[in-house]
Image: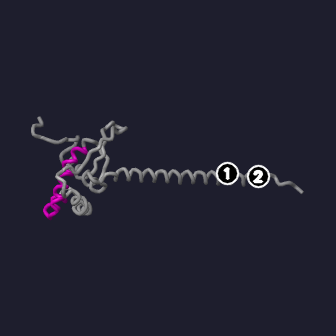
């Protein structure tokens, strides 16, 4: 029986779940918005909100407490200097879970997990990736056309060389 045992197990051991939550929190603070499964996002929400509350305190003890979960010093610095001051007047509710639908491979419920006040970062990133893909496709298409033109030119030269020369 699971009496008095809150939280989702997510099919993992305690240490694996703890590490996964730390990684989700680190990624969220780094990118401001991540796409993950809905149960993971809902479970990571409590971890992230607690970390932001500690970061709002801003003292050395709070920094050390956050460093227990987030190992990257640059992200902790960004958290204390940029993210936490933005929530100084806010009492909780620092994150948002937006449901996207189901993943094609295994029909898992997917969500965007983002920091409130940093909206649009995921949309801008997706748009940038889309533009990169279009540029890459255009470049590949141009290279294919150049290669086809080169082959046609080589075939024409080979045909010219094979033509018998008229005798005088």
Give the residue pinned by disc 1: 152
> Magenta region: which residues?
40-67
Q: What residue is drawn where x is 49% and y is 53%?
A: 136
Disc 1 crowd rating (10 Å Cα; few below 14, some 14-19, many 20+) is few
Residue 91 drawn at (x, y percent): 16, 52
Q: Main secondary structure of the magenta part?
A: helix
Report if residue 27 lies within the magenta region: no
**Mark on residue 93?**
none
N-terminal of the two: label 2 or label 1?
A: 1
Residue 142 lies left or right of residue 10; in this view the side is right
Considering every residue shown, the one lying at the far bottom of the view is 60
Q: What residue is drawn where x is 12% and y is 40%?
A: 5
Q: Nearer the viewer, mark 2 or mark 1?
A: 1
Report if residue 49 lies within the magenta region: yes
**Mark on residue 162?**
2
Above or below, 119 against 10 in this view is below
Residue 137 lies left or right of residue 151; in this view the side is left
Residue 33 drawn at (x, y percent): 30, 51
Considering every residue shown, the one lying at the far front of the view is 89
- Secondary structure beneath disc 1? helix
Q: What residue is drawn where x is 26% and y is 63%?
A: 74
Mark 2–mark 1 Cα distance, whole angstroms, equals 15 Å
- Secondary structure beneath disc 2? helix
Front-lying residue, 49 or 19: 49
Quadrant of the snapshot with the N terminus: top left
Residue 87 drawn at (x, y percent): 21, 56
Answer whether residue 10 is visible to the viewer in this image.
Answer: yes
Front-lying residue, 116 or 17: 116
Quadrant of the snapshot with the C terminus: bottom right
Answer whether residue 19 is visible to the viewer in this image.
Answer: no
Considering every residue shown, the one lying at the far left of the view is 4
């Amino acid at each position: 029986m699971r009496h008095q045992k809150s939280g989702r197990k997510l099919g993992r051991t305690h240490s694996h779940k703890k590490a996964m939550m730390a990684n989700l929190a680190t990624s969220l603070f780094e990118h401001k918005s991540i796409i993950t499964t809905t149960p993971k996002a809902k479970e990571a929400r409590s971890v992230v909100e607690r970390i932001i509350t500690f970061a709002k305190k801003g003292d050395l003890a709070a920094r050390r407490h956050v460093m227990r979960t987030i190992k990257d010093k640059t992200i902790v610095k960004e958290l204390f200097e940029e993210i936490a001051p933005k929530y100084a007047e806010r009492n909780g509710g620092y994150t948002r879970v937006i449901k996207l639908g189901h993943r094609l491979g295994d029909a898992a419920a997917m969500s965007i997990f983002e920091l409130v006040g940093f909206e649009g970062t995921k949309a801008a990133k997706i748009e940038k990736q889309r533009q990169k893909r279009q540029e890459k496709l255009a470049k590949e298409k141009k290279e294919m056309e150049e290669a086809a033109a080169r082959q046609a030119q080589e075939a024409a030269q080979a045909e010219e060389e094979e033509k018998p020369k008229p005798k005088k």
